[in-house]
Amino acid sequence: MKIYVAADHTGFELKKALLAYLESLGHEPVDCGNTAHDPDDNFPQFILKAAEGVSADPNARGVIIGGSGQGEAMAANRLPNVHAVVYYGPAKAITAVDASGRESDDPYEIIRLSRLHNNSNMLSLGARFVSETEAKAVLELWLSIEFSGQERYARRIQQIEDYTHKN
C-alpha cells in the first residue's frame, strides 16, 4: 500500500523510524518531508503534501507526525476525502463496546473504531506523547483494519464530504 508520511521537526526522528518500518512491512512509503531536521520549520507544508497524496488516491493512506498531532490533523482534514484521526496514547472509554457489541477494555479501541466506523485514511501521531515502539504497534494495527462499509457509517462520511465540497 502507498503511504504518504510527513512530519515537522518534533516528529522528524519518529518519521524516519516509521518510514523504515513501513518499508519492512512491505508498504510503499512516500516521504513528504521534512527531509532534514529544522527546528524552525512549519508543519503545514509537509502535512498538506501528504494529505494531497491521500486525497487524490482512494487506496492510499497517510501518517503525519507533530508534537501533539492535533494541528497536523486539522490541516490534513481540510482536503477532500481525507479523514485524519489523532493518536497520542491509549484511551479507554468509560463504557467501551467493541465492534461486535461486547464490552471492551482494549485501550486501542479508538484506533479500531477510527477505521471500522470512520474509514480514517490518515493517522496523526503526537510525537511528544507516543514512543517509537507504541507508534509502530498502533500503526500496524491501524493498517490492518478495514472499513466496515456499513451503510450508516458510509452515509455519515458522505455527508461530511458533501458539506466539505459545498463550502
Image (cartoon, rainbow, N blue to C red):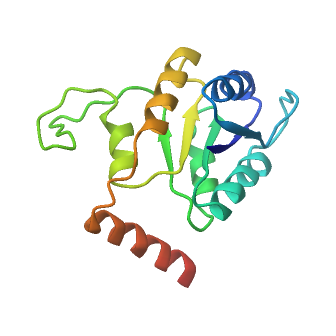
Is 43 placed left or right of 37 in the picture? left
Residue 32: where, in percent of width, then height?
A: 78, 43
The residue shown at (38%, 55%) is: 118
The image shows a total of numbered marks equal to 0
Residue 11: where, in percent of width, then height?
A: 69, 29
Q: Residue furthest bottom?
A: 166
Is 68 placed left or right of 85 in the picture? right
Rendered-image quadrant of the N terminus: top right
Residue 76: where, in percent of width, then height?
A: 62, 55
The residue shown at (58%, 61%) is: 58
Q: Is residue 138 visible?
A: yes
Q: Residue furthest left?
A: 102
Is 94 placed left or right of 31 in the picture? left
The residue shown at (22%, 44%) is: 99
State the residue in front, 57 or 68.
57
The residue shown at (20%, 39%) is: 98
Dividing the picture into quadrants, the one containing residue 21 is top right
Q: Image height check: is 71 above or below 143?
A: below
Q: Image height check: is 33 above or below 38?
A: below
Dividing the picture into quadrants, the one containing residue 53 is bottom right
Q: Is residue 167 visible?
A: no
Residue 133: where, in percent of width, then height?
A: 53, 15
Rendered-image quadrant of the C terminus: bottom right
State the residue in front, 34 or 39.
34
Q: Image height check: is 99 above or below 162?
A: above
Q: Which residue lies furthest to the front in this view?
A: 26
State the residue in front, 135 or 142.
142
Dividing the picture into quadrants, the one containing residue 125 is top right
